[in-house]
């Protein structure tokens, strides 16, 4: 059943550039996915579907109630709202407390709606999700993954018939991602999933790919799509190569025909001068040569036009992708001095097992653990932020911390100024080279940081953290979040080649496998 129809959608940026034009599609599969590179317009398209933005042209017809999950800004995550408030049961719990205290006021019974087990059910939910907090605790005590879980839970319990989920698995550990997948499978309405998470994309029914050429639809999961896409691109490359060679062959034949004709003309002139043949015979030969030359020219022109049209058609179907590269500044020495030592470290709010670790210059360490286990808190403690703990942290170098919210990026700055102003000794020329590697060329280096997509901000932040200091210890808190699949692979390759040291938090096992991890520190003592 078709639940949504979009017809000829177009969206124009404030700069006057078109983000996309004439997109038409229908949502009919139970679970569809929208994929595309960072900055391709996925989040804008979702905002059009929810009517937060208006298209420059086109129409949207939806027959179901829509509910949308989007990434929250950092200030919203630090809200003083309680967990009960987030779950939408705070008024019911207050009413239950009044009734238990002896009140017989009708308004309390009306608020409770005979939901006498609301507190028991909510506590069981927290336990099932691995959240060891009370319902009256503020949401600021939740980890990013725990907050995401509760927001998603409430969405799946809503009466919406179409869920729009924008990168819902960001911050979720392996157990939580499995829970999310089960909720998606069990949902009785329709879902449009915007994600770069291959573990989710492998289980969708339909994939929509948004790129500079438009919107393409594929029936099946990600692995089949990736194979089909690669084969299609390879076939187009072969077609383009064939038509380019054919073009050269036709032009070469044209040149050879002109040379032969010129040779015959020269021979005819010589024969006229010597008088070796009758004038009437020479005139006939000249006329025949002229006709042949005209026929060949016409044939070659037709072949060239047909081939040019075929080449143009193939190029129109082929997306030219500019190669990306993230250049991380290597350590200044090949030695392996001690950079950090943890000795029996216990984080107060987390109450983790005692952690001991020595990090040397060329070690790449993964910090593993479930949502709420204290991974981000540990990075903050190492960075010197106000975190209570027992034990010792011994610093031997400067640390640079990239959190999940890009806090180190100056939102009011341009991309070029962001690098030049914060990286000592970095010239504008080198900064432009680094920015070109992540897709920002020419005048785009003057874009405002605040206007970047999440993936674009993460790539900029990775450049910044690796060039801010000489041989820093990089503290990377889920740097693969928001990145498209191709960019994740580029970042993983850069981290694997990096000759410095880093501590990395990530829940994407595909990304971890490619990032060159040398050691693992488990928050759970596994």
Image: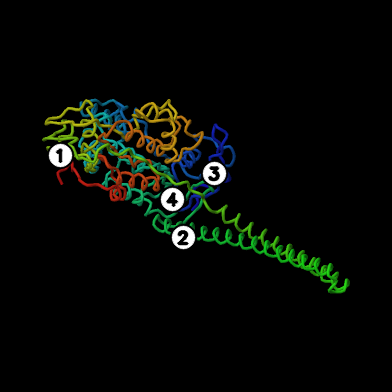
- Asked whether, in this view, residue 444 is left or right of residue 85, the answer is right
Q: Viewer-nearest of labels 2 and 3?
A: 2
Q: Quadrant of residue 10?
A: top right
Judge the density around disc 4: few (<14), some (14-19), many (≥20) Cα neighbours within 10 Å. many
Judge the density around disc 3: few (<14), some (14-19), many (≥20) Cα neighbours within 10 Å. few
Residue position for label 3: 61
Percent x, y for residue 310? Answer: 61, 59
Q: Viewer-nearest of labels 4 and 2?
A: 2
How far apart, in angstroms, are the residues tagged by discs 4 and 2? 22 Å
Q: Viewer-nearest of labels 1 and 4?
A: 1
Identify the element where label 1 is drawn. Answer: strand
- Asked whether, in this view, residue 219 is left or right of residue 331, the answer is right
Identify the element where label 4 is drawn. Answer: strand
Q: Viewer-nearest of labels 3 and 4?
A: 4
How far apart, in angstroms, are the residues tagged by discs 2 and 3? 34 Å
How far apart, in angstroms, are the residues tagged by discs 1 and 2? 46 Å
Q: Residue at horizontal 78%, vertical 65%?
A: 265
Percent x, y for residue 477? Answer: 28, 37
Residue position for label 1: 357
**Disc 4 and disc 2 in contact, CB within 8 angstroms:** no
Percent x, y for residue 317? Answer: 55, 54
Identify the element where label 2 is drawn. Answer: helix
Residue position for label 4: 32
Mark 1 vs 4, N-terminal side:
4
Nearer-the-camera pick, 77 or 337: 337
Q: Residue at horizontal 16%, vertical 43%?
A: 524
């Amino acid at each position: 059943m078709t639940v949504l129809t979009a017809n000829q959608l177009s969206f124009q940026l404030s700069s006057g550039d078109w983000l996309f034009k004439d997109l038409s599609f229908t949502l009919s599969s139970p679970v569809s996915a929208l994929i595309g590179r960072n900055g391709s317009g996925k989040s804008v398209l979702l905002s059009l579907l929810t009517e937060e933005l208006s298209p420059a042209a086109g129409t949207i017809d939806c027959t179901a109630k829509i509910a949308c999950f989007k990434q929250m800004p950092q200030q919203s995550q630090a809200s003083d709202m309680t967990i009960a408030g987030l779950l939408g049961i705070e008024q019911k719990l207050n009413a239950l407390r009044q009734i238990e205290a002896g009140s017989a006021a009708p308004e309390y019974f009306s608020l409770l709606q005979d939901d006498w087990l609301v507190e028991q059910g909510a506590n069981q939910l927290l336990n099932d999700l691995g959240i060891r907090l009370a319902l009256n605790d503020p949401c600021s005590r939740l980890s990013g993954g725990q907050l995401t879980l509760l927001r998603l839970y409430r969405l799946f319990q809503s009466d919406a018939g179409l869920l729009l989920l924008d990168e819902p698995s960001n911050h979720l550990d392996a157990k939580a991602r499995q829970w999310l997948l089960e909720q998606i499978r069990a949902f009785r309405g329709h879902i449009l999933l915007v994600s770069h998470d291959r573990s989710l994309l492998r289980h969708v029914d339909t994939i929509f790919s948004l790129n500079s050429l438009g919107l393409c639809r594929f029936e099946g999961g990600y692995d089949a799509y990736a194979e089909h896409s690669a084969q299609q691109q390879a076939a187009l490359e072969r077609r383009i190569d064939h038509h380019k060679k054919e073009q050269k062959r036709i032009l070469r034949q044209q040149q050879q025909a002109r040379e032969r004709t010129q040779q015959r003309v020269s021979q005819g002139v010589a024969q006229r001068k010597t008088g070796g043949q009758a004038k009437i015979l020479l005139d006939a030969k000249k006329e025949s040569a002229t006709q042949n030359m005209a026929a060949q020219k016409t044939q070659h022109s037709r072949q060239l036009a047909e081939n040019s049209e075929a080449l143009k058609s193939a190029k129109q179907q082929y997306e030219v992708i500019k190669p990306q590269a993230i250049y991380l500044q290597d350590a200044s020495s090949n030695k392996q001095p001690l950079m950090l030592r943890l000795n029996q470290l216990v984080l107060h709010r987390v109450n983790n097992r005692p952690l001991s670790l020595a990090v040397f210059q060329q070690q790449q360490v993964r910090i593993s653990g479930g949502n709420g286990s204290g991974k981000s808190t540990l990075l903050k403690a190492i960075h010197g932020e106000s975190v209570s703990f027992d034990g010792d942290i011994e610093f031997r170098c400067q640390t640079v911390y990239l959190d999940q919210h890009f806090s180190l990026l100056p939102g009011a700055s341009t991309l070029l100024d962001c690098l030049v102003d914060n990286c000592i000794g970095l010239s504008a020329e080198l900064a432009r080279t680094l920015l070109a590697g992540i897709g920002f060329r020419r005048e785009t280096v003057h874009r405002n940081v605040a206007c970047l997509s999440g993936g674009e901000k993460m790539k900029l932040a990775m450049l910044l953290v690796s060039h801010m200091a000489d041989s820093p210890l990089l503290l990377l808190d889920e740097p693969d979040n928001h990145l498209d699949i191709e960019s994740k692979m580029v970042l993983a390759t850069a981290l694997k080649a990096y000759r410095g040291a880093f501590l990395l938090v990530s829940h994407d096992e595909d990304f971890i496998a490619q990032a060159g991890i040398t050691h693992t520190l488990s928050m759970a003592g596994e």
